[in-house]
Amino acid sequence: MSKSYEDILKEVLNNAPPGIDTRQGSIYYDSIAGICLTIARLYADIETQGRLVTIVRAVGEELTVKAAEYGIVRHPATPAKYHFSYEGEKPSVGERFYNDGSYFALLYSDDGYYYLQAEADGAAPLISSGTAAIPVNEIAGMTAATFGELIESGTEEEDDDSLRTRVQEKIAGPAENGNKQHYKSWCESIDGIGHARIYPLWNGPNTVKAVLIDSSGRACSSEKVKEVQDYIDPATRGYTANVDGYTYTVGDGTGDGVANLGAHFTAVSAREMSIDVSFSADLASGYTKDIAKNQVKAALEAYLENLALNVAAAEDVIIRAARIGAIIIEQDAILDYSDLTINGGTSNIAPGDNSIPVLGEVTVS
């Protein structure tokens, strides 16, 4: 337990030899005051270090070190990647393009296509397919260049809460012997995977399916899904399963990944369900409709991301009209609202096992 400077000073003064002047400003007082202050600081440092060596209280680099003791590595920030198209002469790999202040490098994938990769790691606003990609330097013979579909959204470095949760799940699981928790840990150990829903026996004995959500609470790219599939149970034999109108790739089950021999694993991306919100608002003085809309959008995006990443069971992911309303009224720009609809109705929405909610259109009138 920490001791304050005042407590330590009082204790030392009380133990002074008989007859010694211990009043403030005396020789004895002045000679011990500095030492007592140093001791108090040492107590504070010891208390701080004691907090940082536990999973529950460790933060930052200390938490990274503690996680490494359990074989868990903090996910680094990653750059956004987009498909790329052009007209005219083909630009060279390494050429730089920009859009709205963000810079991208043109790269070539192992699968044989060009793509633009953000030069800065981290989450960034989504660029719509067909948006012009402006070359930093003039490229002779190239007449146009555009961004294509998003391949992989950029992600921020994994935050402390997410890393701490992964460590605690591994400790408490236990994640071993190919149990359900083990599959979850395997999936979430891949950079860019923020959450995995695991469904044992989803298509009969010895089958396991993982529904993957990226670190931003969005659908995963096909490349990221393949990375998880190859790590856990490579799919090289062409096995597929047709379930509820969807065709799924099924792993070989030969034990060439981390999964046990005989376990056929399937990795899929969560499907995005667009959540459109519309309402009428009374605005606070000094605010415009656009400001109100932007405030609500940011808050709703955070709400939906939290549902996707931090609610363990898919059946518990419910977009509640009451919570949407509470978020709207919490914004500084809004005094009151009415006529709230979610996807055209007033009922709560449950996306289901294979889907995640993402914000669509926000309409303020």
Image (tube, rainbow, N blue to C red):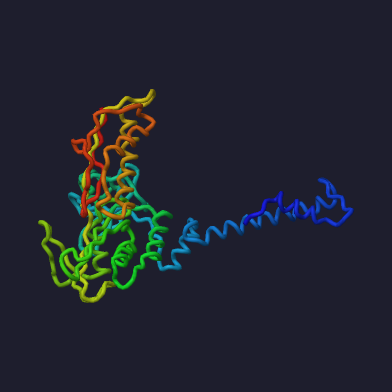
Residue positioned most to the right: 19
Which x, y percent locates residue 323? Answer: 31, 39
Q: Who's the residue at 34% across and 39% down the image?
A: 299
Which x, y percent locates residue 324? Answer: 30, 38
Q: Who's the residue at 22% across and 34% down the image?
A: 341
Which x, y percent locates residue 294? Answer: 32, 35
**Within the image, what quadrant is residue 291 found in?**
top left
Which x, y percent locates residue 224? Answer: 26, 60
Q: Who's the residue at 12% across and 60% down the image?
A: 243
Q: Is residue 30 above or below residue 240?
A: above
Q: Quadrant of the C terminus?
A: top left
**Within the image, what quadrant is residue 77 found in?**
bottom left
Taking 68 as reference, is 173 left or right? left
Query: Can residue 148 be seen from the camera position used here?
Result: no
Q: Quadrant of the N terminus?
A: bottom right
User: In the image shown, does 212 or 117 lie closer to the viewer?
Assistant: 212
User: In the image shown, does 234 or 181 lie closer to the viewer?
Assistant: 181
